Amino acid sequence: MPKRTTLLLATALTTGLLTALPAATATAAPSGLAGDFNGDGYRDLAIAAPVAKVSGKSGAGYVAVVYGTKNGLDTTKRQIISQATTGVPGNPASGDYFGDRLTTGDLDGDGYTDLVVGVHSERIGTTDSYGNVTVLWGGASGLKGASNLTSPLPRYRIELGWALAAGDFDGDGHTDLAVGNNSTPSLNIFRGPFTRKGKATALVGIDTVDQTTIYSDKLIAGDVNGDGKTDLLVMGQEETASGAYRTRSVLYTGTGAGGGTLKVGKKLAGGYDAVIADVNKDGYGDIVTGNFMEKSADEPNGGLGGAVTVTYGAAGGLSSRTPVRITQDTAGVPEKGEKNDGFGWSLSAGDVNGDGYADVAVGAYAETLGTKKQAGTVTVLRGSASGLTGSGAKLFSQDTTGVPGTAQSQDFFGSSVRLTDANRDGRAELVAGAYGEGHGAGAVWLFKSTTAGVQAGGSKTFTGPTLGGPTGTAYFGDVLEG
């Protein structure tokens, strides 16, 4: 595959449109802030459009980047990146879905956040192997230059990059990368630091299926026990005694440098998305798991219309406190639980009002509004001294006063959510995606936050073409990262 040398000029997608990117000054050191690709001290946002047509290839996919400023995310400061972009390895191919797996971390330790893309559907030459992991490198002018992870690599690559998470799992001060693989080993820990040619320091393979019977379908990183080393929640399917499958999760705890990378721990509530955040401000990360399915023998942590389960962190890894389940029928939560709402489809955590407690945004992507089926909503649950609560929860949809647009059937508003403090005021703003908007074109909404939390007033929306991306079915906003 041809290699290219620069990432700022996009071909096939931008039609010549190039906007100047915010850059750190020549003398300023990078901020080191998580999610800050250009080191200017403001968090940035990556937005996937994984089924977009690129260079005539349906489902090739691209990623848009919107940069943070003192006024928040600024859609005039952006990039469009795909495998047609100069500097990115590979070529657009139908069904690659570039961007549908994303994570961030400073892999090379230069103070700039890098963006990692799991291109899990990409075939490796003419072999039976699939899956590349592409790193888009951060720098003073934004994401510029890219490479695939090259070595060491697992022997078998079956959709390598299916799941991604970054963190310092061994506590040595360098960012590591956890990568899911639908083969053996099912989980691969690439130990940092990385070179810009894609070489990791070492590779540790973990067979989660053999250890726990759980496949590594989703990976969530965070510090649950407060020891400064990153822990990893592995989410996936496990086979029951009857031969059926249900979702479960298992917490792997980070270990000391030189002593390995992760130690298998306890199983806990299953689901399809999760976040690790300190919702009760006790110094330990709490695990919030979303399960949009209905409660059944196979989905015991579901609920009518979906549910989120909070498992509290502690010095030993998990608190003895009974996990708390929250549904749309929990006191204080707007709306009510109805079949197939999809509450818990997407999750994100951040402090929306600056009180020090992490709050959680929950997408109910299939919520029906009146006669509009699968229109979708987002509920923001509040953190408190007693933990995550329904009290003070707020609900947003396209029918909320002050929110641009109008809810329609199969918009799937809330199919993705992100809480991020892009303007550095100490309060996280809400970003919500609706991949079905415009018959699958997709769109994203930006909400402001005040000391009273997320506000509908002043919110705005934009699409892929707004940023210079192609028109047509794209699922723009299907994944948000930053």
Image (cartoon, grey):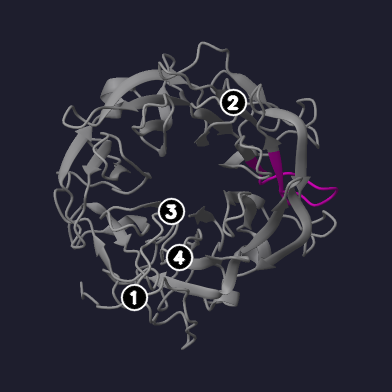
User: What residue lies at 57% left-to-right and 58% top-to-bottom?
Assistant: 422
Q: Quadrant of residue 182?
A: top left
Q: Earlier in the sequence, mark 4 or mark 1?
A: 1
The vertical placement of 282 against 15, above or below, is: above
Q: Are marks 3 and 1 in contact (CB under 8 Å)?
A: no
Q: Are marks 4 and 1 in contact (CB under 8 Å)?
A: no
> Amino acid under label 4?
Asp
Q: Earlier in the sequence, mark 4 or mark 3?
A: 3
> Amino acid under label 2?
Thr
The vertical placement of 287 against 85, above or below, is: above
User: What residue lies at 27% left-to-right and 36% top-to-bottom?
Assistant: 186
Q: Secondary structure at mark 1?
A: loop
Q: Earlier in the sequence, mark 3 or mark 2?
A: 3
Q: Residues within 10 Å of mark 4 (few under 14, many from 20)?
A: many
Q: Residues within 10 Å of mark 3 (few under 14, many from 20)?
A: some
Residue 235: x %, y % from top left? 43, 32
Please give the label number shown on residue 7: 1
Q: Are marks 4 and 2 in contact (CB under 8 Å)?
A: no
Please give the label number shown on residue 33: 3
Distance from the alpha carbon under mark 3 to that under mark 2: 29 Å
Q: Verify whether residue 365 appears in magenta.
A: yes
Q: Main secondary structure of the magenta part?
A: loop
Going by the image, does 260 lie left or right of 422?
A: left
Q: Residues within 10 Å of mark 1 (few under 14, many from 20)?
A: many
The magenta region covers 361-380
Distance from the alpha carbon under mark 4 to that under mark 3: 9 Å
Please state which of the two labelled residues, at mark 3 or mark 1, is closer to the viewer: 3
Residue that numbered label 2 is attached to: 309
Distance from the alpha carbon under mark 4 to that under mark 1: 19 Å
Q: Earlier in the sequence, mark 3 or mark 1?
A: 1
Q: Earlier in the sequence, mark 2 or mark 1?
A: 1
